[in-house]
C-alpha cells in the first residue's frame, strides 16, 4: 500500500471536489466545525430538522452525527439521516460526545452502531471505553484518564471488531483500527485540551477525508494526521503572550496550510503499525 500516495490523492480530491458534509453537530461547536470544514476545502451543511434530514443527507458526501447536545428531535433526525446514508453508500461518522455521562447518550450511540450504518467512530478514550463496555459512569464529556499504549490499541481493535466499523480514538496519541489493523499516530499539541471543539473539529476533518477516500480507514487516518499537523503548526505560530484563544484561531489557519501545502509535510508522516 502506497500510503503517502493515497494521502496525496485524497488531499487533491478534497480540494477539487469540495465534498458536502451534512452535520448534526451541537450548538457549542457548530461554528468551529463549519470553519474547520471550509478550511480544508469541504462544504458544511448544518441541518438537524427531522423534516429535511433524509433529503439533505441524500445530497451529501458524508454524514456527521455529533451527540454533544442530544435531544429527542435530534435522535429522530439522526436515525433517518443514517438510514438514508446507508442506502446511498454515504459514509457516516459518529462522534459519541459524552456517552459515558448518561444512559440516554450511551444507549442511543449503541443503537446507531448496532444498526450497521456507522462507518467511523471518532471519540476520546472515555467515550470509546464506554461504548466497548456499554456502561456509563456520569463523569461528563471529557476524557479523564490516559490509557497505556497496549490498552489503547486493544480497546480500538476490540471496539472495531465488536461494532464492525472503524474506531479512531484521539488524545495525546491517536489510535485507529478497522478490527484487523491497528495503528497509532503521533501529533497534535497539549493546547488542544484547552480549547472548545478540538475533538468535534477532528471528527469533521475525518469526515471530509473519508468522503473522498477510496478506503474509509485510509481517509480516517489522514483526517487524524491533518488535525495533528495543523495543531503543531498552529502552536509554532504563537508568540509568548498568546494562549488558548490565539491557538484556536491559528488552528483554522493550520488546517488550511496543511492541505494546501501538503507536499511540504509529507516526509514527516509515519503512522506506526502496532499490531
Image: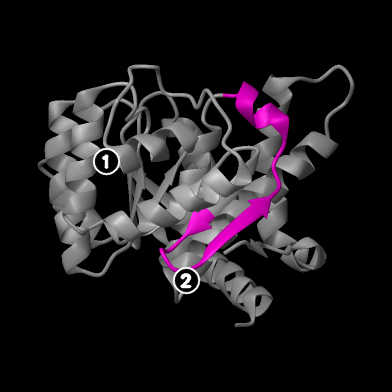
User: Tag 2, which secondary structure?
Assistant: loop
Inspect this view and state whether residue 48 appears: no
Give the left or right position of residue 166, taking residue 182 as reference: left
Report x, y in % for residue 82.
20, 53
**Residue nearest the viewer, comparing 163 with 51:** 163
Residue located farthest toward the front when viewing the structure as drawn: 150
State yes or no: residue 216 in magenta: no
Vertical position of residue 6 compared to residue 91: above or below:
below
Say which residue appears at 50% left-offset and 59% top-offset: 220
Vertical position of residue 101 compared to residue 36: above or below:
above
- Quarter-wise, where is residue 172 in the image? top right
Report the magenta residues as a range. 176-195
**Residue nearest the viewer, comparing 270 with 272:** 272
Residue located farthest toward the right when viewing the structure as drawn: 240
Report x, y in % for residue 133.
31, 38
Question: Which label sits in the foreground, 1 or 2?
Answer: 2
Which of the labelled discs sits on residue 47, or is there none?
1
Quadrant assignment for the C terminus: bottom right
Q: Which residue is mark 2?
A: 213
Give the CA separation, mark 1 to mark 2: 24 Å
Say which residue appears at 35% left-offset and 63% top-offset: 61
User: Tag 1, which secondary structure?
Assistant: loop
Amino acid at each position: 500500500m502506497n500510503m503517502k500516495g493515497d494521502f496525496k490523492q485524497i488531499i487533491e480530491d478534497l480540494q477539487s471536489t469540495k465534498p458536502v458534509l451534512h452535520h448534526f453537530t451541537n450548538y457549542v461547536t457548530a461554528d468551529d466545525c463549519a470553519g474547520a470544514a471550509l478550511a480544508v476545502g469541504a462544504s458544511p451543511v448544518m441541518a438537524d430538522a427531522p423534516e429535511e434530514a433524509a433529503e439533505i443527507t441524500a445530497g451529501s458526501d458524508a454524514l456527521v452525527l455529533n451527540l454533544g447536545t442530544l435531544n429527542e428531535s435530534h435522535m429522530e433526525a439522526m436515525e433517518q439521516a443514517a438510514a438514508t446514508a446507508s442506502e446511498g453508500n454515504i459514509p457516516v461518522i459518529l462522534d459519541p460526545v459524552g456517552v459515558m455521562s448518561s444512559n440516554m447518550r450511551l444507549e442511543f450511540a449503541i443503537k446507531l452502531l448496532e444498526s450497521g450504518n456507522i462507518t467511523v467512530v471518532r471519540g476520546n478514550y472515555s467515550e470509546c471505553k464506554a461504548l466497548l463496555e456499554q456502561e456509563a459512569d456520569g463523569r461528563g464529556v471529557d476524557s479523564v484518564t490516559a490509557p497505556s499504549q497496549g490498552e489503547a490499541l486493544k480497546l480500538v481493535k476490540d471496539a472495531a471488531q465488536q461494532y464492525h466499523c472503524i474506531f479512531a480514538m484521539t488524545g495525546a496519541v491517536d489510535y485507529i483500527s478497522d478490527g484487523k489493523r491497528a495503528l497509532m499516530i503521533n501529533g497534535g499539541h497539549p493546547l488542544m485540551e484547552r480549547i472548545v471543539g478540538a475533538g468535534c473539529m477532528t471528527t469533521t476533518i475525518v469526515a471530509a477525508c473519508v468522503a473522498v477516500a477510496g478506503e474509509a480507514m485510509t481517509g480516517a487516518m489522514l483526517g487524524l494526521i491533518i488535525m495533528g499537523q495543523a495543531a503543531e503548526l498552529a502552536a509554532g505560530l504563537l508568540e509568548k503572550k498568546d494562549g488558548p484563544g490565539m491557538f484556536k484561531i491559528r488552528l483554522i489557519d493550520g488546517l488550511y496550510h496543511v492541505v494546501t501545502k501538503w507536499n511540504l509535510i509529507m516526509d514527516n508522516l509515519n503512522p506506526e503499525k502496532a499490531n
